């Protein structure tokens, strides 16, 4: 598996500088819920330090962690696609510092600067492809370690 793409380091320097004019520094304490599945996705973050767990509510009492994110990772992509709702939940696994970006402002910047918009979309697509592959590997490992028994 290839190394995960980091949004800010993957953007060319001039485009990164333009995007960073929209960044706001935020922090989340350990165990803080950052967002919940099904709620409006109107922002995203780039993690500066700490760890975040992406999770899925599988029963009213059980959440399953589907990914762990750390320094440099993009947190949140649902702001790009209708219906603009989070697909997963996110929780700070440790104290987290991050850059927060307002989705509307970033989309407006992408309209003003199509080259930046194209670069950003390509990088986010690469990040999503990497996460999909990691999820596939995780599911395959889970299936081979715990195959379903067939009844005859």
Image: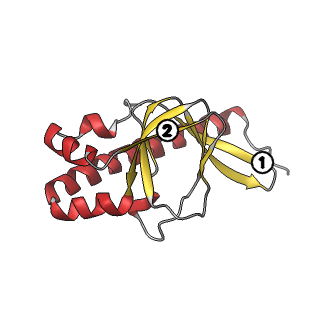
Q: Position of residue 62 (x, y in %)?
A: 77, 48
> How many numbered marks, from 0 up?
2
Q: Is residue 77 visible?
A: no
Q: Is the N terminus in the top left, top right, bottom left or bottom right quadrant? A: top left
Residue at image point 22% right, 41% down: 11
Quarter assignment of residue 38: bottom right
Figure check: 97 above or below 56: above
Residue at image point 34% right, 49% down: 124
What residue does disc 1 label? 62
Q: Position of residue 50 (x, y in %)?
A: 52, 29
Whether residue 70 sits left or right of residue 117 in the image: it is: right
Label 1's element? strand
Query: Which mark, residue 141?
Result: none
| Mark 2 Cα-neighbour bin, 10 Å: few <14, some 14–19, many ≥20 | some
Whichever of callouts 1 and 2 sits on the residue coming sooner in the sequence is: 1
Residue contact between numbered discs 1 and 2, judged by CB atoms under 8 Å: no
Q: Position of residue 19 (x, y in %)?
A: 25, 48
Q: Position of residue 115 (x, y in %)?
A: 14, 55
Query: Which mark, residue 134?
Result: 2
- Look at the image and name its color scheme: secondary structure
Label 2's element? helix
- Asked whether 130 or 48 is in front, the reply is 48
Q: Is residue 52 visible?
A: yes
């Amino acid at each position: 598996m290839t190394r995960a793409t980091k949004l800010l380091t993957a953007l060319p320097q001039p485009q990164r500088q333009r995007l960073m004019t929209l960044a706001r520094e935020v922090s989340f304490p350990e165990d803080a819920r950052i967002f919940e599945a099904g709620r409006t996705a109107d922002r995203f973050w780039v993690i500066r330090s700490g760890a975040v767990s992406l999770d899925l509510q599988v029963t009213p009492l059980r959440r399953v962690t589907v990914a762990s994110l750390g320094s440099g990772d993009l947190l949140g992509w649902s702001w790009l696609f209708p219906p603009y709702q989070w697909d997963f939940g996110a929780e700070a696994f440790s104290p987290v510092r991050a850059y927060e970006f307002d989705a509307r402002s970033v989309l407006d910047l992408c309209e003003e600067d199509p080259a930046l918009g194209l670069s950003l979309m390509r990088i986010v697509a690469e990040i999503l492809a990497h996460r999909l592959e990691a999820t596939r590997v995780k599911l395959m490992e889970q299936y081979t370690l715990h195959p379903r028994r067939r009844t005859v």
